[in-house]
Amino acid sequence: MDNERKHIYEQMREEIQNPDRKFAGSEGKLGDLCLVCIDGTWHRAWIVSIQRDTCNVFVIDQGLPHITTSKALAWGHKDSFLLPPETESCILANVLFLDNSWPERATKFLMSLCGKKFRGLVQDVLKPNRTLLLDIPMVSKPMCKFGVAKKIAVDEFMCLVQKCLEVDHVMQERNLNVGRELEKIDQYFYPDLLMNVLNMLL
């Protein structure tokens, strides 16, 4: 990305830090564009699914799913969503990496790809999170040659990807549930007490 485009995205990120209005009650439906607050910062997103208080959104400029509650969602100005995604979430297709410890030459090879342009075939777009399956021979062939990956059949690869995405979704939901339980405990130990009012404690 050139400096001019970087500046445009930086400006957009600054502008969305002051949302038009936070969600009220059960606002928002499947496919709505919105803003989501993650660690105190607002990001562009769209709603993938809603189940009671749980909202599954897709963070547009990070290319990642995120599970949250409606309290962390807000409406953004429509102009904030005109820019295309800053990054795309991609998976190198039909290649299974064998080990987490790679030889130095494999790591150097991947580092050398930064800033380069190369051709690839989009085999599929996984929804709802818009994850691209990219077949890039000039990347996958050397990785197999280095002994850190092996080619597998397209069908087998698709099954592995779907399983990994399902596990990731389950883990996110578990983390959210743990956070809710901790919030309940916090509320229990720190009840709201009013000044100059006789409070009954049990």
Image (spheres, rainbow, N blue to C red):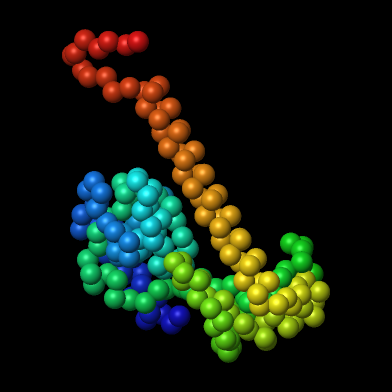
The residue depicted at 31 percent of the width and 46 percent of the height is 71
Tag count in the figure? Answer: 0
The residue depicted at 59 percent of the width and 72 percent of the height is 91
Image quarter for residue 83?
bottom left
Task: Tell which of 75 and 42 is nearer to you.
Answer: 75
Q: Residue 28, percent across and down? A: 27, 56
Left or right, 161 with reference to 66: right
Q: Is residue 96 above or below residue 122?
A: above
Q: Residue 36, percent across and down? A: 35, 56
- Residue 144 in sight in this render: yes
Residue ranking furthest to the left: 196
Task: Tell which of 79 and 1 is nearer to you.
Answer: 79
The residue depicted at 29 percent of the width and 71 percent of the height is 81
Q: Residue 56, percent across and down? A: 41, 55
Left or right, 141 with reference to 52: right
Q: State which quarter of the image contains the C terminus.
A: top left
Left or right, 78 with reference to 148: left
Q: Residue 175, percent across and down? A: 51, 44
Q: Is residue 60 above or below residue 82?
A: above
Task: Tell which of 73 and 164 is nearer to you.
Answer: 164
Q: Is residue 188 above or below residue 106?
A: above
Task: Tell which of 36 and 173 is nearer to you.
Answer: 173
Q: State which quarter of the image contains the N terminus.
A: bottom left
Residue ranking furthest to the bottom: 119
The residue depicted at 43 percent of the width and 37 percent of the height is 180
Image quarter for residue 86?
bottom left
- Residue 108 in sight in this render: no
